[in-house]
Amino acid sequence: MDKLLDEDNIKINLPVKITYRVLEDVLQKKLVGEQIGMEDSRGTVKNYAEVLGANLGKSQEPNFDLTLNLKLKTLTTLFKNKEVTLLVHIKLGFDEVEQVIDVEEYELEGQSKSWFMDNSLETLANTLIYKKIKNKMKLDLKPHINEQLGKANKKLGDEMEAAPGVFLSGNVNILKVAEIIPGDSLLLILLEISAYGFVNVKEVKL
């Protein structure tokens, strides 16, 4: 009987919806005010642009999942204080083993001709902005999952009263993201949950 109680008797695939508006709010906090630049051989950092705004939505380009609309202010001598818009088309990557979401592929599209007046500046924009976006959009899910797993097991270990005289207990052994599905207005995240649990009836009220 004790062995039976230790075996996983609950297996659930739980869909979780996260709207792009929620993700956009997170990205704005990470990106707005950030300066895009690079360090030269002498260790001096030269900034080329500052992020003024960031909007996120479903990409209209084939083979891409999301489009990040960046509003930038240029900081170079040639294009001082010009406001430009860049669209970054993003294909999301997901490593199920490591539980990490990141940018797998991207494509940069300029909405201001002045930003792309020469090939060297376009190359610079691609390199620097890609590094910034890839770094800011990389999300390691393991710490968040482990935190929620600990909270859930603490509650289940202490017994949860589901109804008067009826208590739930058990343990969640597996909690992980199994798949990421981009939609028109949200990300659908499929959670895989494996646990054992049982109901302990301590009182029956007639």
Image: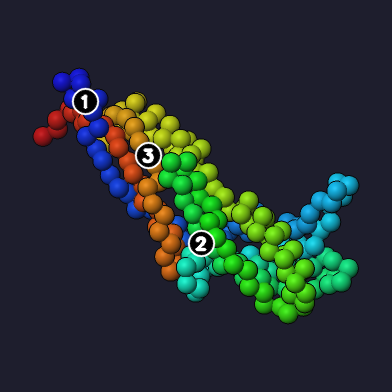
C-alpha separation, residue under disc 2 versus residue under disc 1: 43 Å
- Give the amino acid at mark 1: Leu
Residue 175 is labelled as 3
What residue is rendered at 80% in x and 62% in y?
Answer: 48
Image quarter (top left, top right, bottom left or bottom right) of the C terminus: top left
Quadrant of res 116:
bottom right
Residue 5 is labelled as 1
Residue tagged 2: 91
Is 166 displayed left or right of 111 in the figure?
Answer: left
Measuring from the top left, give residue 145's x and y in whole percent.
45, 39
- Which of disc 1 and disc 2 is earlier in sequence? 1
Are the residues tagged 2 and 1 within 8 Å (C-beta)?
Answer: no
- Give the amino acid at mark 2: Lys
Are the residues tagged 1 and 3 within 8 Å (C-beta)?
Answer: no
Mark 3 nearby-residue class (10 Å; few <14, some 14–19, many ≥20): some
Instruction: Tell me the SS state at disc 2.
Output: strand
C-alpha separation, residue under disc 1 versus residue under disc 3: 19 Å
Which numbered disc, 1 or 3, marks the residue closer to the eye?
3
Asked whether residue 17 is in view, the answer is no
